[in-house]
Image (cartoon, rainbow, N blue to C red):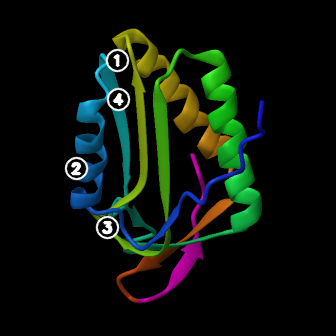
Amino acid sequence: MEKKKPKNVFVQGAISSQFIGESIAKHQTKTSIGAHNIFLGQVRADEIDGKVITAIDYTAYEEMANQKFHEIREATFAKYNLTCMHIYHSLGAVTAGEICLFVFVSSPRRKVVFEALEYVVEAIKADVPVFGKEIFEDQTHQWKQNT
């Protein structure tokens, strides 16, 4: 079997609702799919030390990050009966309220998509070298701490 090459999952800026909608629409012709599940990570306007976050500026070691996304993808397909999976992550500034992570999984059965999606999102948070600099309303910034 041919070894799959890592895909580039990164998009510049926020992930638009139009992009998400088009991704969903493309799956209507895949009639073996019985269930989809979607995770949308959105930038929050958290208050930290009295200052409100207005955006997060994402950076990554892209080659290493794409390799990690690929490994997570392959491990998920090995563990769960999925028909397809798509992962997109923002690079650059994403304003509070906008989408920065879009994970979309599909399977013949619904239970699988719930389990697989949680597995993927937790693995991304734990293992992928993507970094966010929180930008505050006064234009100061700090590196985001994942929780």
Q: Is residue 104 left or right of residue 132?
A: left
Type of the residue with mark 2:
Gly
Judge left or right: residue 25 versus residue 128.
left
Q: Which amino acid lies under the numbered mark 4 shown in the image of this protein?
A: Asn
Q: Secondary structure at mark 4?
A: strand
Q: Quadrant of the N terminus?
A: top right
Q: Nearer the viewer, mark 3 or mark 2?
A: 2
In the image, which disc is placed on residue 32? 1
Q: CA distance from mark 3 to mark 4?
A: 23 Å
| Residue at the farthest front position | 1
**Residue at 35%, 13% in the rendered image:** 110
| Residue hosting label 3 | 96
Q: SS of the residue at dot 1?
A: loop
Label 1 sits on what residue type?
A: Ser
Query: Could one spot residue 51 in this view of the protein?
Result: no
Of tags 3 and 1, the one toward the viewer is 1
Residue 146 belongs to the span the image colors magenta: yes
Q: For the magenta stretch, what is the residue range? A: 139-147
Residue 123 location, quadrant: top right
Q: Residue at x 53, y 15 (%)?
A: 81
Q: Where 95 falls versus 138 (above or below)?
A: above
Q: Is residue 73 magenta?
A: no
Which residue in the protein does label 4 denote?
Answer: 37
Of pointers 1 and 2, the one earlier in the residue sequence: 2
- Given contact means CB atoms under 8 Å apart, are the residues at marks 3 and 1 in contact? no
Query: Residue 90: x percent and y percent?
Result: 47, 65
Label located before the other in sequence (3 or 2): 2
| Disc 1/disc 2 C-alpha distance (Å) | 20 Å
Could you give the CA–CA distance between mark 3 and mark 1, rounded to whole angstroms? 37 Å
